[in-house]
Image: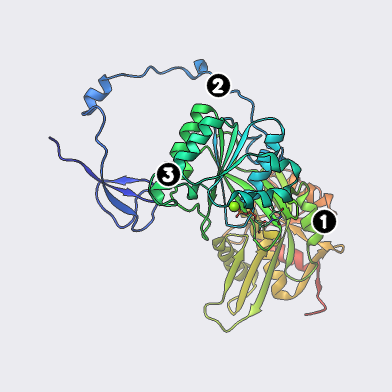
Amino acid sequence: MAKPRIEHVCTECGHAALTWQGQCPGCGAWNTLEKRAAAPKAGGTKRSRSRAGAATPTPLRAVEAERSARVLSGIAEFDRVLGGGMVPGSLVLLGGAPGIGKSTLASMALSNIHASGAPTLYVSGEESAPQIRTRAERLGEAALDVPVIAENSLDAVLATVEAERPAVCVIDSVQTMAVGEGTPGSVAAVREATAGLMDVAKRLDVTMLLIGHVTKEGSLAGPRALEHLVDCVLHFEGERERTFRTLRAVKNRFGATSETGVFEMREGGLVEVADASARFVGEASPAPGSVIFCSMEGTRPLLVEVQALVNPTEMVPPRRTATGVDRNRLALVLAVLTRHAGVSLSAADVFVNVAGGVRVDEPGADLAVALAVASAHSGRALETDGRPLACFGEVGLTGELRYVAHAERRVAEARKFGLGRVIAPRPAEGSVDGLAASATLADAVRAARARGRLSAAA
Ligand code: TYD
Ligand code: MG
């Protein structure tokens, strides 16, 4: 008899390696490989496998495409991020930090779906039924009609889904589902629970909305393999203390991943912020260190306020803190500012923050970060005819400003709110009305300073 094969499987991503290694070759995590007996290969040798039951390839033209209607949650921002609602029988993972509003969003979606006549089920392994009721009471009368079970045994949940046949089922949260006697939340349990739920989802055409907690670092707690199993992964983000929340798709088998929905947490649940630009521009402070960034969130332009604070320090190395923008991007922008625009920051702490708890991930945010820091450094508030200064553009390592897409739409959004003459790199072709083009970061800093006003405080 053949010796059982041993393999080393990563508990984070499921990668299987033949030998033990300190770092997983699959995901780069450390000390995550665990020794396991490999499952015997079906069919023995390669040759005999290829002979047994060969599949017949079909030309794609002959394959019947799925055209089933999507399940609409009635929450426009949620449906838009999903690419037009949930696909029946799909698994959607909604990840976010504790307290951000995942249960609230899921309850609201389910309440609308239930009201539209489709059978629903809310499974909570986290809260008791009375607790869920208390939340639902805040969300309105219709939310109280949704059937709920407070249950964390996967078998019981699967049996209930089989019996009830909901069209849409919420699992809150996938980390609380216990498989057999095992502890819930372990990597194996989360994967097995997801696999079990996926099986009923596909078999009975149940749309599953799985809620997952994320760790402080922002990754979904438990195995990354979970992200491979599900059809869509949504991240619900924001600062807990602030009211704004953003919802974005990081994976979507049925649509784009570029759309972002903006919500505000209010007393009666989450409210969609359809015109987020107006809110953010309205809240912008005409103070040194504040500029408006014309960003693109998917297909939609969005104006957000980027704020910076520059403060002399004795600390070595000085502090660099970024909220809402990438730390590495901030380091790059500060280096270019120092080297090519003469803004010396070596003896200063620098803090950068995107107001409202929004995250901006595109390189087009570089110029906004740079001008906010330059403004904070000089103590001059930047404005155009009494309105905050608007800008966008990527900063290159040699100090040049690089073109970013959708210049017209960004500028048009800024003009809509009376923010004239947006500082930006030269557009790819022609000229854009209301855009003040700069070739380099130094030019942009000069152009911004020319509009600066020495603040009363400085
Ligand atoms: P919750 O949805 O329970 O967060 P999560 O499931 O992500 O852990 O709600 C988070 C917070 O939202 C909670 O502190 C209470 C607050 N909240 C409101 O402000 N208004 C409301 O209508 C509801 C239902 C909750
Ligand atoms: Mg919750």
The residue singled out by tag 2 in the image is 65
Viewer-proximal residue, 41 or 325?
Answer: 41
CB at disc 3 and ligand 2 closer than 8 Å: no
Instruction: Reply above or below: 10 against 165.
Output: below
Element type at mark 1: loop
| Nearer mark to the viewer, of 2 and 1 | 2
| Nearer mark to the viewer, of 1 and 3 | 3
Question: Crowding near pointer 2: few (<14 within 10 Å), some, many (20+)?
Answer: few
How many tags in the picture?
Answer: 3
| Residue plotted at (68% across, 72% down) | 309
Q: Are marks 2 and 1 in contact (CB under 8 Å)?
A: no
Q: Which mark is residue 321?
A: none
Amino acid residing under circle 2: Ala
Quadrant housing residue 71: top right
The residue singled out by tag 3 in the image is 191
Percent position of residue 383, x then y = 81, 64
The residue singled out by tag 1 in the image is 419
| Residue plotted at (48% across, 50% down) | 175
Viewer-proximal residue, 21 or 32?
Answer: 32
Quadrant placement of the N terminus: top left
Q: Quick check: 286 left or right of 243?
A: right
